[in-house]
Image: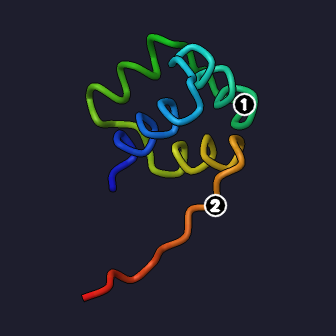
Amino acid sequence: MDSKTLVKILCAHEALNYEKAAKILAEKTGKYFTKTSLSSKIYKDTLRYSEAFILADALGYDLIPVKRKK
C-alpha cells in the first residue's frame, strides 16, 4: 500500500477531512502543512510514507507488516 492510499483510508475511517489531517501533520512534524499542500502531495503522489506513518500513529493506528497467507 502506498502513502496516498494509506492517508485516504485513514481519513475515511476517522471521518477526517484533509484540513484536519494537515493540522495533525503540522503539529506532529513541525513542518508546514495545509489542506491544499496535503491534497497536492496526495494528488501528485509525493507524500512521504513517513508522513503517512506519522498521521497513522497520531490517530492511534499501529502499522504492522503481516506476511500474506498463501
Q: Find residue 55 and report its image quarter.
A: top right
Q: Earlier in the sequence, mark 2 or mark 1?
A: 1
Left or right of 55 in this view: 3: left
Where does residue 1 sit, x and y in percent of width and height? 33, 56
Q: CA distance from mark 2 to mark 1?
A: 22 Å
Which mark is on residue 55?
none
- Depicted 62 relative to depicted 17: above or below: below
Where does residue 63 sit, x and y in percent of width and height? 56, 62
Where does residue 29 sit, x and y in percent of width and height? 69, 36
Q: What kind of residue is marked 2? A: Asp
The crowd level at tag 2 (other Cα within 10 Å; few <14, some 14-19, many 20+) is: few
Residue at 67% across, 26% down: 26
User: What element does badge 1 sit on?
Assistant: loop
Left or right of 24 in this view: 3: left
Residue at 46% across, 22% down: 38
Q: Find residue 45 and report its image quarter.
A: top left
Residue at 59% across, 22% down: 22
Of residue 66 and residue 44, the one placed in the foreground of this image is 66
- Depicted 65 relative to depicted 12: above or below: below
Of residue 12 and residue 54, the one placed in the foreground of this image is 12
Q: Which residue is identified by label 1?
A: 30
Q: What kind of residue is marked 1? A: Gly
Q: Quadrant of the C terminus?
A: bottom left
- Depicted 14 relative to depicted 58: above or below: above
The crowd level at tag 1 (other Cα within 10 Å; few <14, some 14-19, many 20+) is: few
Q: Which residue is identified by label 2?
A: 62
- Between label 2 and label 1, give the one nearer the viewer: 2
- Depicted 48 relative to depicted 38: above or below: below
Residue at 60% across, 46% down: 56
Where does residue 53 sit, x and y in percent of width and height? 56, 50
